[in-house]
Image (cartoon, coloured by chain):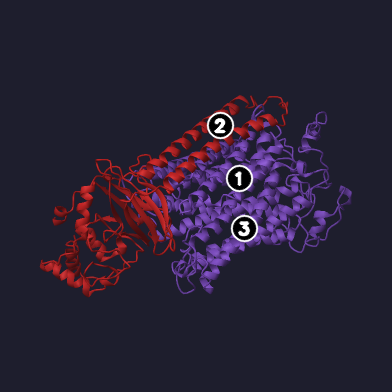
Chain colours: A purple, B red
Amino acid sequence: MRLWPTLRLSINPKIMANDTIFNANDQRPELEPVGYETGSLTGVFQELVFTVDHKKLGLMYIGSALLFFVVAGLLASLMRIQLAIPGNTFLPPDVFNQSFTMHGTTMVFLVGMPMAFGFANYLVPLMIGARDMAFPRLNAFGFWVFFFSGFLLYFSYIGAPGLYAAGSAPDVGWFAYSPLTSSAFSRGHSTDYWTLSLMLGGIGSVATAINILVTVFCLRCPGMTLGKLPVFVWCMLVMAFLVILAVPCLSACQIMITLDRYLGAKFFDTQAGGDAVLWQHFFWIFGHPEVYILIMPAFAITSEIIPVFSRKPIFGYPVMVAAVISIAFISLGVWAHHMFCVGMVSLANAFFVTSTLLVAIPTGIKIFNWLATMHGGKLRFELPLIFCIAFLFQFLIAGLTGVMLAVAPFDWQLSDSYFVVAHFHYILIGGLLFTIFAGIYYWYPKALGKMPHFKLGLYHFAFFTIGFHLTFLPQHFLGFLGMPRRIYTYQAERGWDEWNLISTIGVAFQAVGIVFFVANLIYSFRRGKKAGDDPWDAWSLEWTTTSPPPEYNFATLPVVKSRRPLWDAKHPDDPDWKHE
Amino acid sequence: MPAQAVSPPSPALTKVANIFNPHSGPAELILEPTYLVLLVSLGIFLIVTGLLVYIVIKFRQRSPEDPLTEPPQIYGSYNIELAWTVIPCLVVFVLVLVSARTIVEIQDAPMPENALKIRVVGHQWWWEVHYPDLGIVTANEIHVPTGSEDGTRRPTHITLESADVIHSFWVPQLAGKTDLVPNRINHTWIEPVSPGVFLGNCAEYCGTQHANMLLRVIAQSPEDFAQWVVTQQKAPSIPTEPLATQGRRNFYALSCVNCHKIESTPAEGVFGPDLTKFATRQTLGSGVAPRTPETLRAWLANPASLKPGCYMPDMQLSPQQIDALVAYLETLN
């Protein structure tokens, strides 16, 4: 039920977020009517453009991330069609190279990160009992900067070499190893579109991360100490820290490339004595924490869903939080494991083997704690839990192949091979994307007030899971058989033909799964059952308010005494705070 | 063909470059930590998956009508947490030690005095191969000796450089990857145990034709290798056949000499592969096609038809010019 009309621009959002004037329902002030019509298409459009509400921005983040996800998925499908048979001529080499560059850049910067920001935006204020993010206008700024950075990147398809020639998208790979990006090897402007759009996107990311940080530190409701934050909020907090530490390194890299290309700076220009390996160090100092930025939402979402559907609190809360923090900390010191082949001295290689393998310890702790949370529970197999269980299985495989790749001699063989492609798709699709689906199904009733359709969700799960494993499991074997990544074609009879064909067939299953997913989102929005405030019988604060929540989230700011405020309310005889 | 009469027969080609089927020192050394980490991972995989399956079956909600009583609330246990922190620590410790040992064994391996020294320079999209001590320059196909039958080792020490962007040297059955980085000299070594032809690829994305920057290493017995060296060191003979003579004239009259080199002739180009002993190679275009008169004709007519985006331009040759050039190039053995 919507208690208030849509957001008024006349209300200072800061007051909404901080002030306690709305303590009781009867004190809600009468608001000025908005300057635009509600209900019509232009009204909706204006609302989207002008809004500073964290929930609308959160949904806009998730919506645009899904849009870019579909585009990146289409690019991936084109590449898989090209690789289905040896010597295929479906895509010319330059189009293939542009496709994997755009696919990678899109998935990391326009799908993974905005998805994380979307979930953080929508849920962090609700979970900590706040009325909005700390800086709502900065929040809107962050979203629009991200959104237009995506458009800038894709504009390269028509605009890159200038107005008088056909366009060309960036084709240097998403980690753009120099000197391939220097003006000698990357002529035209496609690389400039890549650098500028990432620089722009970086500004938005840092703005949003600062916002999340300040929100968590300053806007928690009474009683919510840091030790009582939901694990979700902890993960998002850690993600925000990583964004602030890592993304500026990327921006610095982009500035340096631009100086190289246009002002003759020669940081990375090997023809003038620059250092190509320097770029790799700089890029991966950003790039490796970035991987953990991307996986944090997976940890966050799983840590909310598994307890609720197992009907038990998260096992070992302090250890879980410590594990997340230590993963983030270690991730700052593992970057050169992407560079075992560049010819570092043996001592440096051994150091990065050690630091990388250390990540396995807190990661293992997390997996065991999730299992322990399920152990002894009463598992309700709703859509969110089903996706989370698949996540556990796939993330386990991804983690183990990660351990393998951390062993430098193994990496000398399989670095830059299809084994690596399989590994990080098990992390980012099998890990991150599955939990994103879980999260979308879990909070769909909260955000839209309707229950997602179970059967459609099940079809989505079945097709997507089968397709996922068909596509990416064979790629491990392709790596063992010596197939390098980023090749647009290959010769027959090298042992790669069958595995590549299976891999391509898997894509069709994934596509059907995605169709069921989109169908479910639309169908449930129109015909779904009314959800009510708390359809899953959950325990965190977002379920205390209406579905969808009103603009101000909570009429009365909640006061919490434990990590599961709704458990306390539902079980006054045995509240959590007695045990914590 | 006269080429066959001079060069020894080529050893068998292994098309499937399986890393579990190594044929040389470093690749064999890598296999030990590989099996260890695979075994450890398999163990962990079975344990955790077993637990997951057990939990999912055992603790499922029995029926939807199951009255909504909540299970016992358990908040954690520091003893259990300690157990699953310490055990992974031990596993990590072992893996670190094993990795470190193999890293040093491969990276810091001492090279014997008699090791064959090769310098490989990566180009967009082909490999330049120098044998500095033997005065041989070739491309895309690396001939190396195996150890001799009396047990004398003869590893090949390879110096890796790049002329343009980063490439990576990867022949899975012989050694792991090492990058070719401009402005930097890297090293790797191989030591094939038996004769054979081993396929490899450039393994670092290097631009349009990264996919067709193929590589083959031809390991030969010491005797066959010595014979190959003798062949390569001979100065090219001047063809006597009229068509080939015509082709030779074309080669110098057209722009071929700007990019290609033929030893002891005015052709001194350095941008493309050295063609001195072109007709002793098995492939053309860095492995994009086998070297036959037909593929060579197609290549000369338009290189981009075989390797789109490559830097060798379409020289707009007439069919007669192509025939003559093919005849000439086939005499370079």
Q: Return the chain for callout 3.
A: A
Q: Secondary structure at mark 2?
A: helix
Tell me the amino acid under the disc marked 3: Val
Decide if residue B50 is on the left or right side of residue B112: right
Q: Earlier in the sequence, mark 1 or mark 3?
A: 3
In the rendered image, residue A511, in percent from the top left (x then y), is placed at 49, 46
In the rendered image, residue B283, in percent from the top left (x then y), is placed at 26, 55
Q: Quadrant of residue A135?
A: bottom right
Q: Which residue is mark 1?
A: A436
Q: CA distance from mark 1 to mark 3?
A: 22 Å
Same-chain status of marks 1 and 3:
yes
Q: CA distance from mark 3 to mark 2?
A: 35 Å
Q: Which residue is mark 2?
A: B48
Q: Quadrant of residue B14?
A: top left
The circle drawn on residue A247 is: 3
Q: Who is closer to the viewer here, B13 or A7? A: B13
Location of the C terminus of chain A (image quadrant): top right
Whether the residues at callouts 2 and 1 have beta carbons within 8 Å, the answer is no
Q: Residues within 10 Å of mark 1 (few under 14, many from 20)?
A: many
